[in-house]
């Protein structure tokens, strides 16, 4: 986190926290929505404590290990990745409540 914080401040770039989780209950949260809220809270805490811009995005997948690479690319590149003919994984983004 220290290195990411230093780079974020130096380049005035936001930090994007991305997670891909199963649709099944796990040790961190019972639902994907609960997991997304916890990641969002973590990003908000980092933002406040470190004085950085931060965002959280959570995706669900029936097989997170299989979908990891394409989901991370999707989170970072968005539609630019799709427009180049790449296919996305079956992972879905979890909507975040406010």
Image (cartoon, rainbow, N blue to C red):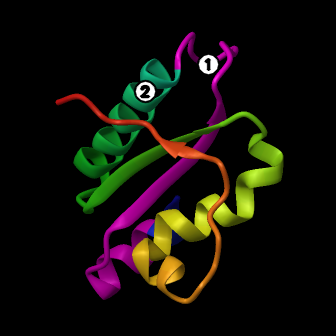
Task: Tell me residue 74's x, y (percent).
Answer: 53, 66
The residue at the point 78 percent across, 39 percent down is 63
Query: Is 9 left, or right, of 6 in this rendering?
Result: left
Query: Is 95 left, or right, of 90 in this rendering?
Result: left
> Hey, which residue is sitting farthest right in the picture?
66
Residue 76 vs residue 28, the one in the foreground? 76
User: Mark 1 or mark 2, which is nearer the start of the sequence?
Assistant: 1
The residue at the point 27 percent across, 51 percent down is 47
Query: On residue 28, which mark appears?
Result: 1
Residue 70 vs residue 29, the one in the foreground? 70
Location of residue 84 with respect to 71 vertically, above or below:
below
The residue at the point 47 percent across, 76 percent down is 77
Secondary-structure class at tag 1: loop
Secondary-structure class at tag 2: helix
The residue at the point 51 percent across, 77 percent down is 82
The quarter of the picture where residue 72 lies is: bottom right
Query: Is 66 left, or right, of 57 in this rendering?
Result: right
Location of residue 78 with respect to 24 vertically, above or below:
below
Task: Tell me residue 5's x, y (percent).
Answer: 41, 67
Residue marked by disc 2: 38
Give the quarter of the figure containing the C terminus: top left
Characterize the local packing of mark 1: few (<14), some (14-19) or many (20 or more) Cα atoms within 10 angstroms: few
The quarter of the picture where residue 39 lies is: top left
Pointer 2 with pointer 1, Cβ within 8 A: yes
The magenta stretch is: 5-31
> Hey, which residue is sitting farthest left in the picture?
98
Location of residue 96 with respect to 3 vertically, above or below:
above
């Amino acid at each position: 986190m220290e290195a990411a914080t230093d780079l974020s401040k130096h380049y005035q770039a936001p930090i994007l926290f991305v997670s891909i989780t199963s649709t099944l209950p796990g040790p961190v949260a019972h639902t994907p929505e609960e997991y997304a809220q916890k990641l969002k809270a973590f990003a908000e805490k980092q933002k406040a404590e470190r004085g950085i811009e931060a965002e959280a995005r959570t995706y669900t997948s029936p097989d997170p290990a299989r979908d990891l690479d394409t989901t991370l690319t999707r989170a970072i590149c968005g539609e630019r990745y799709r427009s180049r003919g790449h296919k996305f994984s079956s992972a879905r983004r979890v909507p975040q409540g406010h």
